[in-house]
Amino acid sequence: MPKAHVDIELRWGDQDAYGHINNVAFARYLEEARVRLFWMGTAREDTGLDGHFRGSKPEDPKMLVAAQQIEFVRVLEYSASPITVAMWIGKLGGSSLEVHYEIIDNSEAQQQIVARAITTVVIVDGLTMRPTRLTGQGRAAAERWRDEPLKLGR
């Protein structure tokens, strides 16, 4: 399965009153991993996805989150070990794509998946903010990281 991986440090402030990582922090981890993958190109793997779905000029395409679903599998305790966010493209549309994730706890010898998620992003025109079709190059780059979609829900 082709997956891109981004390692993210936990922060002490990500904990809640119960002493585990708060559910809200998971949405931030997904966002950070998405930015590193699609904007910065700093995943462990050289994916070629950066630069196709956003630009620095106002008229350039923008990536907007249309929907996000997170399924929590296990409690994540604060530790000095970074988590790993594994990502792939589960579905490609005309102007949208689904980013699928597994968040992995690396604090123990046997790594555990603590959450799974799907984010639907839509590529929009930077000026009109209306959906715009994926470019041929963007579609080809995403296709290389496409794999079986997650099925969330218990």
Image: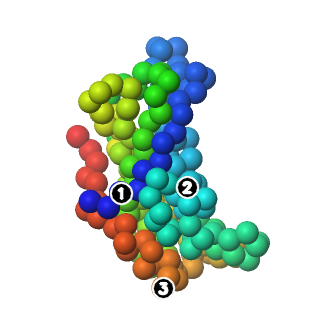
Residue at 42% x, 79% y is 140
Q: State how far apart marks 3 and 2 are (Cα).
A: 22 Å
Q: State how far apart marks 1 and 3 are (Cα).
A: 21 Å
Residue at 29% x, 64% y is 147
The kind of residue on which mark 1 rests is Lys
For marks 3 and 2 on the same chain, the one whose residue lies earlier in the sequence? 2
Query: Mark 3 falls on what kind of element?
Result: helix
In this view, 99 is above or below 28: below
The kind of residue on which mark 2 rests is Thr
> Which class describes the residues within 10 Å of circle 3: few (<14), some (14-19), or many (20+)?
few
Question: CB under 8 Å between callouts 3 and 2?
Answer: no
| Residue sitting at the far top | 18
The dot on residue 3 is 1
The kind of residue on which mark 3 rests is Gly
Residue 109 % position (x, y):
29, 27
Residue at 73% x, 69% y is 56
For marks 1 and 2 on the same chain, the one whose residue lies earlier in the sequence? 1
In this view, 132 is above or below 82: below
Q: Is residue 58 left or right of residue 70?
A: right
> Which class describes the residues within 10 Å of circle 1: few (<14), some (14-19), or many (20+)?
many
| Residue sitting at the far right | 58
Of marks 3 and 2, the one in the foreground: 2
Residue at 45% x, 74% y is 141
The dot on residue 24 is none
Of marks 1 and 3, the one in the foreground: 1
Q: Which residue is mark 3?
A: 136
The dot on residue 42 is 2
Q: Is residue 131 left or right of residue 60?
A: left
Color encoding of the figure = rainbow
